[in-house]
Image (cartoon, rainbow, N blue to C red):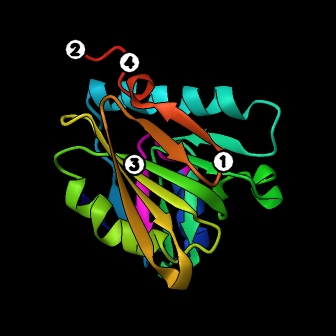
């Protein structure tokens, strides 16, 4: 990710500025970063994951959101655009610009974002009290890394591969990975 124009903002100024932009920008402690475009596989997988979650959450208090909804991480003074997230929190259902209480965050990796998704971004996400599961979807290897919150602020890794079903413990269901990777060559 590259700094967008070396701009510095307070959070409220960033939100006002971002609302008028044609491209998306993430925010980290006053600095604004332009988001690059995604390749076709990334968009297809993100859409598949959202659709699978939407289908299973219909009529339940939890709601999935796709890439255009921002996530606020207060501890890091940051705003991100996760590929997909699920919130079961009543305050998020009324949110206009950003969510603050997701229980699941899903990032679909690209070559340029892999280290960031596993590193600083996950470090920030772990400070969200409501977060129970963080999934990293690797399109190229048809693999999902699911980090699940455990006791004492530990995060346990569960790997899922192409023939597996991904367990969403916080949502009480599973999704076959074939649904994640549907319509890919």
Q: Which residue is depicted at the point 62% across and 75% down? A: 129
Indicate whether 46 appears above or below 103: above
* Disc nearer the start of the sequence (3/2): 3
Mark 2 highlights which residue?
185
Image point (65%, 58%), residue name? 99
At x 56% / y 59%, what residue is drawn?
71
Query: Disc 1 to disc 2, how far (Cα)?
Result: 30 Å
Q: Measure the C-alpha gap from mark 4 to mark 2.
A: 9 Å
Check contact, mark 3 vs mark 2: CB within 8 A.
no
Q: Secondary structure at mark 2?
A: loop
In which image quadrant can residue 31 be found?
bottom left
Residue 4 can be seen in this image: no
Q: Residue furthest bottom?
A: 152
Q: Nearer the viewer, residue 8 or 136?
A: 136
Q: Residue furthest front?
A: 164
In whole angstroms, how far apart are the C-alphas of marks 1 and 3?
A: 17 Å
Q: Secondary structure at mark 3?
A: strand
Q: Residue at x 29, y 24 (%)?
A: 40
Query: Which segment is the magenta one?
Result: 19-27
Q: Point out the image quarter for the C terminus.
A: top left
Q: Based on the displayed image, in which of its 4 quarters is residue 64 positioned?
A: top right
Q: Nearer the viewer, mark 1 or mark 3?
A: 1
Q: Is residue 160 magenta?
A: no
Distance between the alpha carbons at the discs numbered 4 and 3: 17 Å
Q: Which residue is mark 4?
A: 182
């Amino acid at each position: 990710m590259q700094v967008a124009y070396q701009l510095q903002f307070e959070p409220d100024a960033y939100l006002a500025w971002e609302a008028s932009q044609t491209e998306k920008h993430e925010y980290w402690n006053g600095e604004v970063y332009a988001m690059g475009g995604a390749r076709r596989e990334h968009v297809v997988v993100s859409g598949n994951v959202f659709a699978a979650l939407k289908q299973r959450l219909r009529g339940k208090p939890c709601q999935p959101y796709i890439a255009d909804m921002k996530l606020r991480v207060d501890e890091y003074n940051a705003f991100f655009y996760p590929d997909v997230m699920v919130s079961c929190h009543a305050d998020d259902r009324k949110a206009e610009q950003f969510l603050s209480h997701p229980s699941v965050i899903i990032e679909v990796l690209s070559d340029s974002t892999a280290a960031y998704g596993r590193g600083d971004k996950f470090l920030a996400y772990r400070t969200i009290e409501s977060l129970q599961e963080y999934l990293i979807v690797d399109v190229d290897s048809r693999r999902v890394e699911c980090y699940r919150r455990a006791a004492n602020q530990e995060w346990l890794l569960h790997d899922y591969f192409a023939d597996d079903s991904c367990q969403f413990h916080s949502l009480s269901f599973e999704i076959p990975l074939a649904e994640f990777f549907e319509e890919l060559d």
